[in-house]
Amino acid sequence: MLELTGSGAEPLEADDPRRIGPIPLAGRLGAGGMGRVYLGVQDGRYVAVKQLLSSVVGEDADFVRRFGHELDNLARLPAGATTPLLASDRTARPPWFATAYVPGITLREAVDLHGGPLPARALWLLLKEAAAGLAQVHALDMVHRDLKPSNVMLTSDGLTLIDFGIARAAEQSQLTRTGMVVGTPAYMAPEQASGKKGQSGATDVFALGSVLAYAASGQPPFGDESGHGVLYRIVHEEPDLEPLRELDADLAELVGTCLAKDPEDRPTAAQLLERASRRGPFTTPLWPDAISGRLFERAAFAADVQDVDVPTLPLAGTKPEPEAVPAPEPVVAEPRTEQPKRRPERRRTRVLLAVFPVVVVAGGTTLAIQYLPHTGSPQAGPAGSPPASVSAPANPSAPAQAPSSAGPSGTPSPSASPSGDPAQAASATPQPPAASGGPGNTPAPGPNPGPATGNGGGSGGPSTSTSTGSGGGKTTAAPPPAPAPPPPASGTHRYRNGDNGDCITQVYGSSDHGSCSDGSARWTVRGRGDGSFKLVNEQSGACLYSNGLGQAVFVGDCAQDIGRIWRTGPDGSLRSDLGGGCLDLPMAGGLNTSRCAGEASQRWSPV
């Protein structure tokens, strides 16, 4: 087993794979809402292998396409900007990619390890190294979009920025987590929080200013919560730079320009690099003693690459050769004495575990799953569709009916009768629901079905017919699903909640509920050919979008489709195509999507 001391990795857990693609794994470097990062060995070097979570990738083909595009962008980045991309498989389920292992620690870890704010000299070095990486990226018209302390890696010879490009793919897909719009709220720029302007290199410069303020105080300059409060302060209030001002007034002034509300008022990454370079030279050790000691351990581990001993499963379809069984000894009769014939003694073949020793190795099951197609429980059908019914014989010992006895329409054919009597088989055929006589209830074409006895017993709606065949089984004909309601009329509406009377509003990059007279409560319906639609806020021009079932609902760029597509439910709900959840009022602020249950809090009436 590979010795992990000094690596920063934890031992693999029972549900972790032992190999991803061709790369054997030795430990787990980290985990988050998007995926897990493992320590592996490839071509005589340590690598960091990031595997996305299959539970959140699902079958989102659009995400896989965008993820592949971002991997292409990552491959374009120069070596000095970030860790190089070494291998990937965008078609795997789940997808993964591997970069060079960085023998360092995150800025968040460094501040904790140091026990407080970093000294001014280290802050200028942090600015210089980060600006150098961003300047190379911005020169290629690319943007990081999620610069934060956990994406800044300090090393013994400088600094490395990680997770370029992947943040964009995550933002545009169902992988976006609650509290994330196009990055982490505490480090977002005003244009990200409001969704009113496009993003550029100035967006990263604002985030870098917030990262420096964090390194100088242990707190981001606008607060570290993920709710609407921090977004409001980012857009409207001034940052708290007092701790940084006490350390270095010149640096505090420069960081203040990075945190300007207007992107045009911020310096470029190249200008920051030039300004910070004047504070050099920066001699080793570059970082405070406690941080440098940990970095020395990481560097020593990376310099001594060990082999990972991972068992390999036999190829599918191959069978082990059985052990040869010795031939039985011949039976020899003794002279003058008639002996009964002796049956040859049977030799037992050895148990299967001896032939398949790999089965006994821990983690073999997980390793096998790694190479099998991902499967899951059957997906629920569309909202409003009836569940499939299954008939079972009343007598558990009775044999199951063969599937071939069903006709093309799903009803039993005459030959399905156990007695062979076609009339008896016909009597077991489910009858169509009887018409109630009310408006809109038209009996199905065909012969008169006669009276049908339903469970409801009333005449106000369609009934369900039930009959019993000779086998004692019961077959139930479910009523046809109700047609999907039409989308709301085109135009601009306010959407009033059936529980508290509030309307859907927008608070910067998030949705909320409040007074229907609020200026952000007006939403324009942008219809689509299949009856679905987008809801565009009249004030900001951004679209209401869901992050998936059980997640918060935000407002963002209408150019994307993921999460932006809504449909009306038969109960007046607004249902998202992403996860099938209904727009709902959570216990806390904002809005989310939850399982559709016909509750008043899920009913939204256009007014």
Image: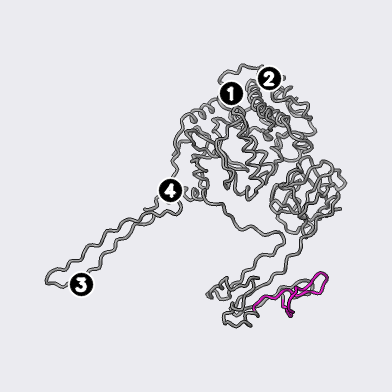
Residue 274 marker: 2
Q: Is residue 249 visible?
A: yes
Closer to us: 390 or 603: 390
Residue 474 marker: none
Which type of secondary structure does the marked residue at label 3 adopt? loop
Marks 1 and 2 in Cβ contact (< 8 Å) = no
Mark toward the start of the polypeptide (4 vs 1):
1
Mark toward the start of the polypeptide (3 vs 4):
3
Q: Which residue is mark 4?
A: 361
Q: Nearer the viewer, mark 1 or mark 2?
A: 2
Check the image and report above or below for 329 versus 87.
below
Check the image and report above or below for 291 versus 602.
above
Closer to us: 196 or 589: 196
Extreme residue toward the left, this view: 336
Q: Which residue is mark 1?
A: 287
3D distance between C-alphas at marks 3 and 1:
92 Å
Residue 288 rendering spot, x and y as whole percentages: 58, 23
Which type of secondary structure does the marked residue at label 4 adopt? loop
Residue 412 rendering spot, x and y as whole percentages: 62, 75
Marks 4 and 1 in Cβ contact (< 8 Å) = no
Closer to us: 262 or 1: 262
Q: Which residue is mark 3?
A: 340
Q: Which residues are magenta?
A: 428-453
Whether 322 is among the magenta residues is no
Mark toward the start of the polypeptide (4 vs 2):
2
